Every structure is written in C-alpha cells, then in structure tokens.
Image (tube, grey):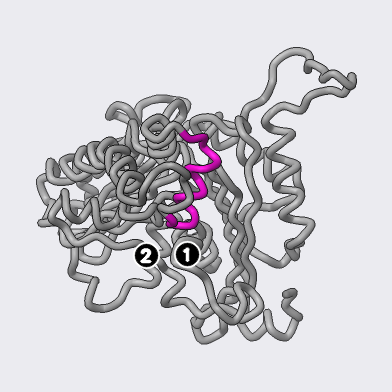
Amino acid sequence: MALGLISKIRGMRETVGIDVGHYSIKYVKVLHGASGNKIVVDADLERVPDGSIVNGEIQVREGDAPTNENGQREKDGAELLSDALNKLLLRHPIDDSCDVVASVNCGAGAGGVLVDKISVKVPKNGNEAAIILQTAQSRPPFDDQDNVIDYEISSRENDELKVNVVAAKSALLDSWAQFFNRRGVKLAALDVDIFGMLNAYVATMEDKDRDQTVALFNVGEKKMSVAFVQDGVFHSMRAMAGGSLDMVVSKTCMNLGIDSEKCHEILSKGDLSVVDGFSEAEVEAALRLAYEDLMAQIDIGIRYFFSSEDSKPLNKILLGGGGAAAPGLKDFIEERSGIETDTVNPFRLVPCDSKVFGEGGISIALSNIYAPALGLAMRKF
C-alpha cells in the first residue's frame, strides 16, 4: 500500500525490512500508526541462488565470465542475487516515501561483526562520543582501521558509562550498500540479521519476560549466531564458528542415505514418514544425531555468556531462523540444556492484514523465518 499525503501528515509511516540470508531474501512491510500501533501489511520471500553469498559476502567473479554449452555468459553470484531481489521487488514495489532497512547474514567468517562491552569515564563537559570511540579504537579487534564502529550506551553512573560497541568491516558494508543502491533501493539503515531478530523479540516482549535472561539463537542455512537479553535489554552477541541448518541436513543425509531435497522436505513439513525404507523412529534417531553437533555449538554460546562478570542465570532459550522449526529440535535442546526452550514466533503479538498470510494466519515456521525482517520493519525513523 502507498500512503497518501494526509496519512503522512498525521504521522503514519511505512517501513520495509529486507533480510538477506544464505537461503532466501525475506521482505516485510509494517505500517506505523500515528498512535504508535503497528500492523504488518505485506510480506514475501524469494529463494537465493546457490553460491551467491558465502560467509556473508556477495560473490563477484574476477576475470572473464565462462560461457555455457549454448554460448551464453554465465552470471556470477552478484548478478544471480540481483535477479532474485528484482523478482521480489517486481512483486512488491517500494514507494519512495518508505523507510527501508536491510540486514545481511554476516555474523561470522571473513568480515564478520564484532561486539563488545566497554566501560568509559567521561568527565564533565567532555566530548562523550569522541571519548567512547577513542577508547574502543584503542582495543583490539576494534583498532583495525578498516572497521566501521557504532555504539550504544547501556547505563550511566556518575561519570562512568557502560557501552555496547559494534564494529564491521568497511568493505563488507560498502559492498552491500552498493548492491542495494544499484537496484534503486535507498536504505535508511543497514544491519545484521541477529540484531533484526533481537529487535523483533524486544518489540514484542511481554511484561512478564522483561526481568528474564534470554538467549536468542538464529539458526540459519549456513550460519548460527546468538544474542542475549538481560533485564529487557541487549547484553551481548556471539557469532558461532559452527552450527547451521546445512550441517543438520548434511549429517542427516549421510545417516539415512538420502539427498538434501528429501531432508529439506522432512524439516519443512515436520513429517518423519516421508523417507521410504525407514520408520519414523529411525528418522527421529538420525535427526537427534545431527542435533548433537548443533547442541555443541549452543553450549559454547551459553558458556560464553556465563563467562561475563555481570551475567545472570539463563531463564529461556528462543530459536529463530530456518532451523527453528526442525522437528524435535526445540525439545532436544530443552532436554539437553535443562533450560526452557521455545521459538521466537514474534508474529503472534503483531497484527497482520488478512491479505498478507490469508485468513489462517502465518505458520510458526514462517514466523521464525521472517523474524529478522519483521524486527527491521518494526523500526520507525
């Protein structure tokens, strides 16, 4: 929907969130009412061509492009990704008045995102921003000159500030900003998928959860990351070196002797009976073996959190991303960790126009896949 001039004067705005993962591009549009109410008015996704993105980086070919058997020039990852985004935008044109926030899955690997907490003393009448940035840049790995640094003040006590510092590689951010700019998408902000999911959770948090400590694991196709919320605010974030839906698929395929397409069918449908020659119990056992490797990475993330001096006991684990709805995963993690485990499922608390997902509403699986894009679109500029 395109807002008219009167609506904008009255304070109504639209924000589009675009989350680019290794498996799909997710698009969510939110209408912000003048009174602060929000409603999802559009949503869709488009498959990302295989190999277009590796470790959060758009794959651009160097040198001359090869040709196929028909003599046609083969497209590189950037061109294939561009085609996928164009398909999405043809179905959902973005009005110039919309604010657009995009996020990318670059929490790990080369050019990853770095997050840390620092304490800074700012004397009276001191240049707060300059002192924070100077302090951050004096500490590795934030001292790299190729980093773009941002920060958020989490608390103040007299002249001492507690600050969350985030850094990302300039070249990585530039490549993504240019990618969207060349497609005519004017970004209000560029973010990371785990922070989009974090925003979706915080924006839909119920009052009873505001004093809890929660771990949000984004289980993506190729990567997994975790953000921790303590006392209702962001505490810390970690990108996992391993753990992903792809890892679960690979190990399950090996254990059952099936191809990845059949394994994705098991995971997307939650149906353990689709594999010929195996009982449901055997398929479940194969999945649990694959979940062991995922659980090892989750344990690493939790130990990282507990190593912080100010960490409190963890009350809940929430799963998001494409792997959140894997059959039996939620129960498996709760059983192994002893911590209550559920999925983020932020759409349960955000009203949606009936045209978006139909009268039946959105499934829990899609709610978790769309969570980062929703979190981006929940922002109002």
Q: Secondary structure at mark 2?
A: helix
- Which quadrant is the C terminus positioned in? bottom right
Q: Nearer the viewer, residue 228 or 365?
A: 365
Q: What label sits on residue 367 in the rendered view?
A: 1
Residue name at image x 79 percent, y 57 percent: 90
Most extreme residue toward the top is 63
Crowd class of label 1 (few under 14; some 14 to 19; many from 20; radius 10 Å): many
Q: What label sits on residue 236 in the rendered view?
A: none
Please state the horizontal and vertical placement of residue 365, each as a whole percent of the image. Answer: 46, 61
Residue name at image x 15 percent, y 50 percent: 337
Q: Mainly helix, strand or loop, the magenta region?
A: helix
Q: Is residue 300 left or right of residue 362?
A: left
Which of the marked residues, 1 or 2, is nearer the chain's N terminus?
2
Residue name at image x 79 percent, y 24 percent: 74
Q: Is residue 264 magenta?
A: yes
Q: Amino acid at mark 1?
A: Ser
Q: Above or below — where is 57 with respect to 8? A: above
Residue name at image x 67 percent, y 65 percent: 98
Q: Amino acid at mark 2?
A: Tyr
Q: Is residue 133 left or right of residue 95?
A: left
Q: Is residue 60 left or right of residue 131?
A: right
**Can residue 167 be seen at all in this image of the molecule?**
no
Q: Is residue 90 magenta?
A: no
Please state the horizontal and vertical placement of residue 25, each as a whole percent of the image. Answer: 60, 50
Q: How many marks?
A: 2
Q: What label sits on residue 201 in the rendered view?
A: 2
The boundaries of the magenta stretch are 258-271
Q: Above or below — where is 101 with respect to 201? A: above
